[in-house]
Image (cartoon, coloured by chain):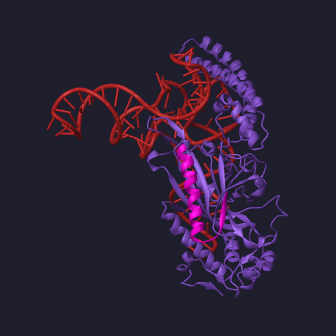
Amino acid sequence: MLDIKFIKENKEIVEAGAKKKHVEVDIEKLIKLDDERLKILKEVEDLRSEVNKVSNDIVRDQDPALKIQLIEEMRTVKEEIKAKEEKLKTIVEEWQKMMLQIPNIPDISVPEGKDDGDNVEIKTWGEKTKFNFEPKDHIEIMNSHKMVDFERGIKVHGFRGYFLTGESVKLCFAIWNYAMDFFTDKGFTPIIPPIIDRKESFLGTGFIPQGEEDLYKTQDGEYLAGTSEVPIMGFYSGEIIDKKLFPLKYLGFSPCFRREAGSHGKDTKGLIRVHEFYKMEQVVLCEANHEISVKMHEEINRNTEEFIESLEIPYHTVINCGGDLGLGQVKKYDIELWVPKENKYREISSASYFHDFQTRRFNIRYKDETGKMNYAHSLNCTAIPTPRILVSMVENFQQADGTIKIPEVLRKYMGGKEFIS
RNA sequence: GGAGGCGUGGCAGAGAGGUCUAACGCGCUCGUCUUGAAAACGAGAGUCCUGCAAGGGACCGUGAGUUCGAAUCUCACCGCCUCCGCCA
């Protein structure tokens, strides 16, 4: 959510930002609506002021006839207030609806573009893996090692269902334990949040109303979160944070649930796109300062790059184009890992910053040194998702003899084992 | 799942239709006094909306309602506590 005052004072910037994100908005209409809102608000408040004044007169005045007269007068004023409040309510409802649709302004460094095809590579790391044998895809490799069971997964869960079995489970635990050490060493506080969450946190993070179809819903009206970013942002909702605590850095760990509505034809086989998975996520709250947000953004993205580098998996990093940005995102980097059999890079991580777009919706604030209240800034970046990471891991590290090399850094979490055979 | 009780400022806690501009206390900030501190004394202090300002409005868990007037009455929701049941 943007500040309405900012929108009114920077109409052209907001319009250009929406255009860059390929989002349709009618700023002119919103401004007119807001003027109307303020006008009626003023009228309602003036009337209320009168009622308050006369109310005191009614108490203090001793003349019973006058009292009755004043009460009668106020009765008509009350009718007037009621009518105006009704009108105000409908305007405010529409105003809120429109405000939720105004996208945050993308950074100047974000490239123009329609969708992920227009994202721009800004870095590559490692050599694309070469094989002196015919490599297999992750499905074949994992099946042959009984690391996964898709048939029974589909039988039990349905479309996109899977069981992880045997060594892949141990690999997941190794990755989680390693990631836990890696990120807590960088000052992150681990946190396991509730993943069944009320609507408010989805509104705050921006997954509702636009992305509601992609969420699973319970019969009690809560939703299953697709990322721990949702409850972790909700953690401080409505609170005033002590500035001394910034930057607040959390490493969330949770299952993630995604309906993948609207992507039924995509990645129908394998572990790339599944309905439920686990993810470690970096979530950061910091002071409301653009330079600090940018610095934190680079930092959390770099953390994940370093993590991938330590796993020795070739990757590249892209900067997402305007059309591939979420409503609240100012800028986003995706880290994509090399998947040999697909002969392309596949997304593993996404680092975004939001300025105060989310914290304004969550009402997360702090007092600066002058005593002024500010909305904090928020950022998040994937630390590591499982089992998607296994796709590129087993494909890149498969050996001619059919074994899979375990990355050096994971071995101590795998009982010293070097290969899965 | 059943029964009952309770949500008031940073904390604690009164207020039970109008004089609430929310008491008293603790804590906090500033000042006086002091070499410095403590104590004592004095003063001050929230958030949001609106307005150039003066000012006005809203906020007693949240939202509706009753009333000329609601922290106070009614309803719903959220949360906390106690007891019973169920489960681990």
**Depicted B74 relative to depicted A311: above or below:** above
Boundaries of the magenta span: A291-317
- The question of residue A341 being in magenta is answered with no
B85 or A197: which is nearer to us? A197
Q: Residue at x 46, y 50 (%)?
A: A245
A343 or A156: which is nearer to us? A343
Tell me the chief SS of the magenta region.
helix
Image coords of residue A299 (percent x, y): 55, 55
Q: Residue at x 55, y 53 (%)?
A: A284
Tell whether A383 sits left or right of A146. Answer: left
How many numbered callouts?
0
**Depicted B2 relative to depicted A2: above or below:** below
Q: Would you identify the image quadrant in which residue A362 lies? A: top right
User: Hue of chain A?
Assistant: purple
Q: Residue at x 58, y 48 (%)?
A: A378
A159 or A291: which is nearer to us? A291
Image coords of residue A231 (percent x, y): 61, 56
User: Hue of chain B?
Assistant: red
Image coords of residue A41 (percent x, y): 67, 25
State which quarter of the image contains the N terminus of chain A.
top right
Residue A55 visible (yes or no): no
